[in-house]
Amino acid sequence: MTVRNRMPALLLALVLLLAPVWPVVAAPPPASPAPPARHVVVLSLDGARADALRAVVPASLVARGGASWTAQTVRPSLTLPAHASMLSGLIPAVHGVTFNDWREGGPPFRHPTVFTAVVGAGGRVAAFVNKQKLMMLVLQGPGAYARWLAYPRFRQADVVETAARYFVEQRPAFLFVHVADPDDRGHARGWMSEEYLAAIAAAPGLMERLLRAFDDAGVGAAALLIVTADHGGHGTTHGTTRPEDMTIPWLALGGAARSGAVLGQVMVYDTAPTALVALGLPVPPDWQGRAVAEALRPR
């Protein structure tokens, strides 16, 4: 090959040698879908039977989310074991709270809860409870606020109003609100008595107050309200495996709830994983509860 014939090849080689080497940039990973909620509030109506609450909750309110009127609590159907399950996703045989009394200074709950998961992820939590024994389950310290509003000095409307104002001012990622009126009226006058039903009749107003707090805080589209109970009751007692004691309501409302949701079987210990999934947080693999995903707005 002559020098003339070799010139094009030499020029091409020189161009390739001098050409800049551009770095290979990997495509960015797809963005994770936003969680349905940035805020979750759980309202526990102590002692609320599902049939009693169903009779007073307007259909228009239920249509803004979803409801199960056949949800089940744990055995024993008592306040402290059920709330331990509600907030930890564990059954009593695992979390060990089969007793129903606790005093300040007693040992705290030792298992992970919604409170510990949210704070561990950098969020803030709060709790307002009507019974002192529930202070066993809440979290206090950095990122957490808890207050015991003793019954009967504070009735359910007072507790919810205090919690709603706190939510508007502080906007915690997770807020737990507990009211004792239905349980107190059940023990004093009987479940399904006139006094008991009067306490239950006020529940829709409590729900509406918390939903209004979402709007007042400017987070209505990104907030979830879960309304449930620890147990029902019969006569003037509870704690048995009778359907009246075991069957509880479970509702999901608010902008992060799926409107018109049809819910399958729900257990009280499904509440904790539902709250975490709504917030986009992982559920501990050893929890017995499952997230009620059908109650949440599609991402």
Image (tube, rainbow, N blue to C red):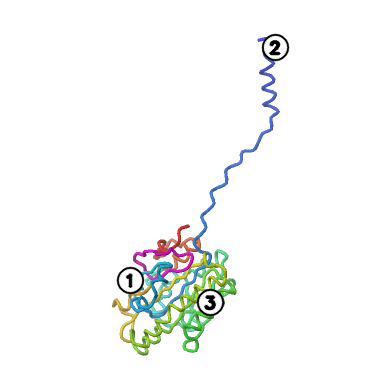
Asked whether the beta carbons under mark 3 and mark 1 sit within 8 Å of each other, the answer is: no
For residue 4, which numbered disc appears in the image?
2
Given residues 287 and 224, the one toward you in this image is: 224
Instruction: Give the magenta range.
Output: 250-268
Q: How many marks?
A: 3
Characterize the local packing of mark 2: few (<14), some (14-19) or many (20 or more) Cα atoms within 10 angstroms. Answer: few
Mark 1 neighbour class, 10 Å CA radius: few under 14, some 14 to 19, many 20 or more: many
Percent across and percent down for residue 299 are: 48, 57
Query: Residue 201 appears at what percent x and percent y?
Result: 40, 82
Which residue was labeled with disc 3? 164
Disc 1 to disc 2, C-alpha distance: 91 Å
Q: Which residue is mark 1?
A: 70
| Tag 1–tag 2 contact (CB < 8 Å) | no
For the residues marked 2 and 3, what is the alpha-carbon distance in whole angstroms?
A: 88 Å
Q: Nearer the viewer, residue 121 or 244?
A: 244
* First in sequence: mark 1 vs mark 2: 2
Instruction: Please check the rendered image and state whether residue 261 is part of the magenta-colored stretch, yes or no.
Output: yes
**Secondary structure under the numbered disc 2 in the rendered image:** helix
Picture residue at 49% right of the left edge, 61% below the top? 36
Residue 20 magenta-highlighted: no
Which kind of residue does numbered mark 3 sit on? Answer: Ala
- Across and down, in percent, residue 253 comes to 45, 69
